Image (spheres, helix red, strand yellow):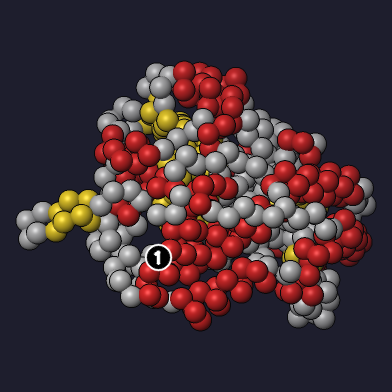
């Protein structure tokens, strides 16, 4: 395994939006209507830069082989690239050791891994798992399944009307019986940034573990697992410039060591006889079968790209765009923006409604102008229930978005408002 110290340093580049946009050829394309693409659906998935696309091609063209099991040159190279990617990810999130990085398919699989391999082993009826009302379904459903199967209690930290969490309530909801607090760092539906320090302090005071759903934080802001003092972190490559089908679970090494495997099969064993098997050490214990080698390597390239920009600069840029968008959209007749009104407490996600117009109609009219947003419940139906709306329209930003694109969104919405006669 490549140690973090052996990785080459990544050269820091100035934040040059024109240069960044040149790395994303898709941003130059036209959509069906002939309009120029304005991609504002980054919370669903990001675009991929040429550097990541090139890495995928390079891997399959020059190094492709199955990993870990052979002595031939290609297999050794592929193994090295795969393990290097693991180390890059470890360095990116401040992990103590590359073995703490488990490659999965996505955030959903990472959370399910913890529900199976940790919770099913260690939790008993009456133990409590605490999540919040603003979670993505992937951080609700696995715990409901566990509750129904094992008789644990599932509790929710409620959302306040402004889309933030009720932190006072959290103090009493997290109790001595709480074994795990599984919480998003940032809501994909509202953009709310959760004060993880407050939640973690309470969880630690009662001896509970903390799992952070980092699907919307790791791509968008500096994340350091040591500084956070949490126990697990789950995130997806596809929201941070990498391909679909590669995700990460980070966990503290002793915890991962104490857990049983998630899936059984090749690569995750130490010995197999006809009677029984013994397990490989982490991370192999949790990576049964042939992994997604090429996309893990490409995730390493995505991490290099973001590191070169600097995650503090990524956050600064998105904060600026979000601040501009909050002000610009507030001027459009009939628009109501959900969530906290200031860009300091939210990421680059803006959920809104336009009075009397169904979000799907907004999305469709905007698409004719090339503006890609998402409409629906955003896999966060409890948030929609709390807001008392069936769906919202959502614009979400990333490293390559510009204020001119926010203007395109706003003028598109003005047209929707005119078209539907909104005053
Ligand atoms: N959590 C959050 C906060 C998300 O935004 C998402 C993706 N929308 C997920 C979890 C699930 O990610 P994936 O579908 O990649 O597993």
Callout 1 secondary element: helix
What residue do we see at 60% from left, 19% from top? 168
**Of 416 and 121, the residue lying toward us:** 121
Q: Position of residue 82 (x, y in %)?
A: 45, 62
Residue 417 lies in what quarter of the image? bottom right
What residue do we see at 61% from left, 73% from top? 53
**Of 201 and 306, the residue lying toward us:** 306
Left or right of 297: which side holds 407? right
Q: Where 326 sits versus 165, above or below?
A: below
Q: Position of residue 150 (x, y in %)?
A: 28, 38
Left or right of 299: which side holds 265? left
Q: Position of residue 170 (x, y in %)?
A: 54, 24
What residue do we see at 55% from left, 73% from top? 56
Q: Position of residue 124 (x, y in %)?
A: 27, 31
Q: Where 256 sits versus 209, above or below?
A: below
For disc 1, the neighbor class at 10 Å (few under 14, some 14 to 19, many from 20) is: many
Q: Where 43 sits versus 27, above or below?
A: above
Q: Where 95 sits versus 240, above or below?
A: above
**Which residue is denoted by mark 1 in the rendering?**
79
What residue do we see at 63% from left, 30% from top? 195
């Amino acid at each position: 395994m490549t140690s973090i110290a052996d990785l080459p340093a990544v050269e820091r580049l100035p934040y040059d939006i024109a240069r960044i946009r040149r790395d994303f050829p898709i941003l130059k394309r036209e959509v069906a209507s002939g309009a120029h693409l304005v991609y504002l659906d980054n919370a669903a998935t990001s675009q991929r830069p040429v550097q990541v696309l090139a890495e995928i091609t390079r891997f399959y063209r020059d190094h492709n082989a199955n990993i870990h099991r052979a002595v031939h040159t290609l297999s050794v190279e592929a193994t090295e690239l795969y393990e290097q990617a693991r180390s890059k990810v470890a360095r990116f999130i401040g992990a103590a050791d590359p073995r703490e990085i488990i490659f999965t398919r996505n955030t959903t699989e990472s959370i399910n891994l913890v529900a199976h391999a940790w919770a099913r082993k260690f939790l008993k009826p009456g133990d409590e798992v605490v999540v919040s009302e603003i979670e993505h379904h992937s951080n609700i459903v696995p715990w409901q399944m566990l509750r129904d199967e094992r008789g644990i209690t599932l509790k929710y930290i409620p959302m306040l009307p402004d889309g933030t969490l009720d932190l006072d309530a959290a103090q009493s909801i997290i109790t001595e019986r709480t074994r795990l607090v599984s919480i998003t760092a940032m809501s994909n539906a509202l953009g709310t940034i959760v004060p993880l320090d407050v939640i973690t302090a309470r969880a630690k005071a009662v001896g509970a573990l903390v799992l952070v759903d980092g699907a919307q934080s790791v791509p968008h802001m500096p994340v350091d697992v040591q500084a956070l003092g949490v126990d697990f972190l789950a995130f997806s490559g596809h929201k941070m410039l990498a391909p679909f089908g590669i995700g990460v679970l980070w966990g503290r090494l002793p915890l991962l060591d104490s857990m049983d495997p998630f899936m059984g099969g090749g690569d995750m064993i130490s010995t197999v006889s006809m009677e029984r098997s013994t397990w490989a050490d982490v991370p192999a214990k949790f990576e049964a079968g042939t992994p997604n080698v090429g996309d893990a390597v490409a995730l390493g390239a995505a991490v290099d790209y973001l590191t070169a920009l600097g995650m503090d600069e990524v956050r600064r840029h998105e904060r600026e765009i979000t601040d501009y968008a909050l002000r610009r959209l507030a001027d459009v007749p009939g628009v109501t923006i959900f969530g906290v009104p200031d860009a300091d407490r939210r990421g680059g996600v803006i959920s809104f409604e336009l009075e009397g117009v169904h979000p799907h109609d907004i999305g469709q009219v905007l698409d004719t102008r090339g503006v890609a947003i998402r409409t629906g419940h955003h896999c966060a139906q409890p948030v929609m229930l709390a807001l008392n709306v069936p769906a919202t329209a959502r614009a979400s930003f990333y490293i390559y978005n510009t204020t001119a694109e926010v203007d395109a969104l706003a003028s598109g919405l003005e047209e929707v408002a005119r078209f539907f006669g909104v005053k």
